[in-house]
């Protein structure tokens, strides 16, 4: 029986992943670290409502078999670049450091397609720096998921995402496979599989995420 840590469980993919962990008999405890409570209930959940920018203070509670990091924000939601970087870079990298210190051998984090430490675009550069520094911790089973546009039922309204989704649905036949949108459900399923099975690469593309989730479906 395993214990999971989940960061970002109130977001789109994180909510789905949390529900999957609740339903999965191989996980007996789910440590939930967040600034706000989840609406999902289970006796498995151990809730830690904290300042996520001070995650390092909770090293004693940060013990598990696997860490799932679904943390992320957007430019429109977090226009201040310093705060943005604290969220998209600072939290995942701090979590990886804590995982390394506490000998957690599985670390799975959502990044983004186009992440590149040398990018001239702040968003892509920040994600690239996060990937670099997470990998630098040398956690044995580190998986960085690089999805394209993530779609699903969100609590918030993202106009730009709706426009992009409409475009992809309308002109999808013109878009190369690797750029096609991906469902949050698919990402969550792949993350759960990666917590149980090994994959040959640390950085996993959007198409590979879909393949992992599809193969899981074929086995059931």
Image (tube, rainbow, N blue to C red):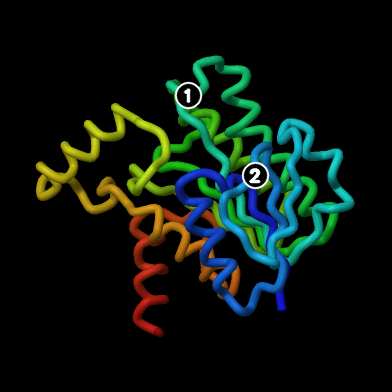
Is the residue 147 above or below the residue 88 in the image?
A: below
Instruction: Find residue 128 and report its horizontal and vertical position in percent.
Output: 53, 36
Q: Nearer the viewer, residue 40 or 116?
A: 40
Q: Secondary structure at mark 2?
A: loop
Location of residue 12 in the rendering, given as x and y in whole percent from the top left corner: 45, 47
The answer to the question of whether label 2 and label 1 lie on touching residues, with beta carbons closer than 8 A, is no
Quickly name the residue at label 2. Answer: 37
Which residue appears farthest toward the right when viewing the image?
A: 60
Placement of 23 over or under 58, stated as above or below:
below
Residue at (45% x, 65% y) in the render: 189
Q: Kindly identify which numbered label has been placed on residue 77.
A: 1
Residue at the spot x=68%, y=37% of the render? 35
Identify the image quadrant of residue 25. bottom right
Calculate the distance from the C-alpha at mark 2 to the C-alpha at mark 1. 19 Å
Residue 98 image offset from top left, x and y in percent: 79, 48
Q: Is residue 85 above or below residue 214?
A: above
Name the residue located 76 percent from the left edge and 63 percent from the top edge.
64
Indicate which disc residue 161 carries. Answer: none
Image coordinates of residue 199 in percent, x first then y, are 52, 69
Q: Quadrant of the C terminus?
A: bottom left
Q: Is residue 51 left or right of residue 85?
A: right
Is residue 133 in view? no
């Amino acid at each position: 029986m395993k214990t999971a840590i989940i960061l970002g469980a109130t977001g789109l993919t994180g909510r789905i992943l949390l529900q999957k962990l609740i339903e999965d008999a191989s996980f007996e405890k789910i440590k939930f670290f967040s600034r706000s409570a989840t609406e999902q209930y289970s006796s498995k959940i151990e809730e830690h409502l904290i300042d996520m920018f001070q995650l390092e203070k909770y090293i004693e509670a940060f013990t598990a078999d696997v860490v799932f990091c679904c943390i992320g924000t957007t430019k429109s939601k977090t226009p201040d670049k310093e705060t943005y970087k604290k969220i998209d870079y600072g939290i995942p990298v701090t979590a990886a450091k804590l995982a390394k210190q506490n000998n957690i051998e599985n670390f799975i984090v959502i990044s983004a397609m186009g992440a590149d430490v040398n990018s001239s675009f702040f968003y892509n550069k920040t994600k690239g720096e996060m990937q670099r520094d997470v990998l630098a911790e040398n956690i044995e089973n580190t998986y960085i998921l690089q999805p394209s546009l993530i779609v699903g039922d969100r609590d918030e309204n993202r106009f730009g995402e709706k426009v992009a989704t409409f475009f992809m649905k309308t002109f999808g036949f013109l878009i190369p496979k690797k750029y096609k949108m991906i469902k949050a459900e698919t990402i969550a399923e792949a993350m759960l599989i990666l917590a149980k099975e090994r994959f040959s690469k640390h950085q996993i593309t959007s198409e590979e995420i879909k393949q992992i989730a599809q193969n899981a479906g074929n086995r059931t």
